[in-house]
Image: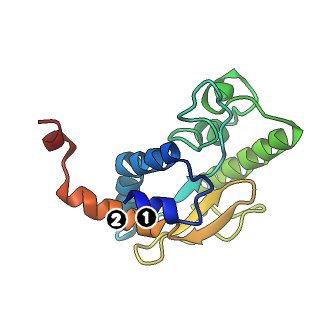
Amino acid sequence: MYDLYAADLQRVWKQEGHIILALGDDYAFRVQALDAASAQAAVASTCYYRVNYPVNLPDQPCQNNRSPHGSELPFDFGYVNDQTGFDFIGKPRHAQDDAARNHLMDQMMLAWTASARTGDLNGGDLPEWSLFTGETRPTMVFSVDAHVKNAPFYAEYKAMSDFMKGFNVFDALK
């Protein structure tokens, strides 16, 4: 699986540690989130997203310049410009980063408030965000250039999902 992750041209990193972290992230979070979204989509309207904002946490090298689990929270709740947000994503690197963070925060807050108000996540300057299906897996990628991509990193998801069917971490610890 390492070779599969390392060969994917969508990945902006190629360092061994980052690839191992991506494997761990998929094992711990993404496979279950996609499986849950697929199950939910079978019975109700479902949307799926990922955040692609490289946090600025140089004192935390395993998280720095990645989008770790939970890093969307300051964007969701409007805290990118205060200490609460800085604890999650660090301070802006420069004026362009500050502007990008604020734009991303505005987009995410707009999507969630539109959903609460109307049941539809679309609006503002976001691209059209289709409902999730297990077949096409449309995913809003919240980044400097928010876009929808069908099934990003699908080969990795499939490989990790298949691996997890036959592997139990508790058995490995025996």
Please tell me whether residue 94 is drawn above or below residue 142 in the rendered image.
Answer: above
- Label pair 1/2, CB-CB below 8 angstroms: yes
Camera-side residue: 8 or 49?
Answer: 8
SS assignment at label 1 = helix
Query: In x, y percent, where is residue 143?
Result: 69, 54
Residue 146 locus on image (x, y percent): 70, 60
Horizontal arrangement in the rendering, residue 18 relative to residue 157 (left or right) = right
The quadrant in which the C terminus is found is: top left
What residue appears at the point 63 percent right and 56 percent down from the top-left corner?
12
Q: Amino acid at mark 2?
A: Ala
Tell me how many marks there are: 2
**Which residue is most to the bottom?**
135
For residue 129, above or below residue 70: below
Residue 101 visible, this angle: yes
Q: Is residue 164 left or right of residue 119?
A: left
Residue designated by label 2:
159
Q: Which kind of residue does numbered mark 1 sit on? A: Leu
Identity of the residue furthest to the right in this view? 95
For label 2, the crowd category at 10 Å Cα-Cα, with few meaning under 14, some 14 to 19 and many 20 or more, is some
Q: Count neighbours of disc 1 (C-alpha within 10 A) and say few if under 14, some if 14 to 19, many if 20 or more.
A: few
For residue 158, above or below residue 16? below
Residue 47 visible in this rendered orientation of the protein: no
Which quadrant, please, contains the N terminus?
bottom left
Q: Nearer the viewer, mark 1 or mark 2?
A: 1
The residue at the point 49 percent across, 42 percent down is 17
Tell me how far mark 1 sits from mark 2, CA to CA.
Answer: 9 Å
The image quarter containing residue 135 is bottom left
Image x and y of residue 10, in percent: 59, 64
Residue displayed at 36% across by 67% down: 158
